[in-house]
Image (cartoon, grey):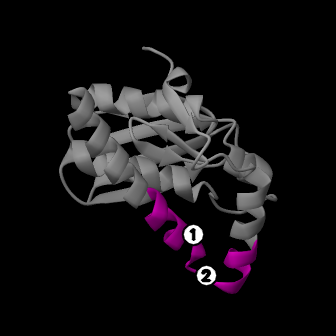
Amino acid sequence: MASILDKLAWDSNSGAITFKGVRYLLIRPETLANWQEAVEQQDALAGEKIFSGGLAGGRLSGRGFAQQMGLTPRQMVDFMLEMGCQIGWGRFALEELNEDRLVVKAFNSPFAEAHSPAKHGVCHLIRGVFAGVAETILSGQIEAIEEECLAKGDEYCRFIFKKK
């Protein structure tokens, strides 16, 4: 697979970074983690709201890139795992993919690394993005669980996506 980073385009006039016409941005993980922790202190549903943002992005990216590039469901998952790695979201591994379930591991999640120690999963954006991908390939509403998380002291973050 060709490097996604090689295909990023920077427009110095607008200050935009794009991949295949879709805009992306670079931001320090500590910036997001600080914001996330502040919001979580004020709102018990903050994690689900952050997840919702990731879900919207995962739906758009998964469907859009699959159509644009002519990817099968498995190729779309592989592409999104590789893209996540190349844009700095950690190293991803597909653990399971079948007609009812998608299981993904994330090693070195910047969201978990920058977050203070937690009693629950904190990688809401990753969980949301891959829930959007899972909705597309599993055709329906998805239950999305971060079963393990680096911020909890686990070795990696592990996400389970299954049909509701």
Mark 1 is on which residue type?
A: Gly
Residue 70 spot, x, y in % from top left = 20, 27
Residue 151 spot, x, y in % from top left = 73, 52
Furthest-bottom residue in view? 42
**Residue assigned mark 1:** 47
- Residue at 24 percent of width and 33 percent of height: 68
| Frontmost residue, 151 versus 125 | 125
Residue 37 spot, x, y in % from top left = 74, 70
| Frontmost residue, 106 versus 68 | 68
Q: Is residue 156 magenta?
A: no
Circle 1 sits in a helix, a strand or a loop, which is it? helix
Q: Indicate the quadrant containing the C terminus: top left, top right, bottom left or bottom right.
A: bottom left
* Residue interval drawn in magenta: 38-54
Q: Number of marks in the image?
A: 2
**Badge 1: residue crowd in 10 Å (few <14, some 14–19, many ≥20):** some
- Residue at 57 percent of width and 69 percent of height: 47
Q: Indicate the quadrant containing the N terminus: top left, top right, bottom left or bottom right.
A: top left
Mark 2 is on which residue type?
A: Ala
Q: Is residue 56 left or right of residue 89?
A: left
**Residue assigned mark 2:** 44
For marks 2 and 1, give the CA distance.
Answer: 8 Å
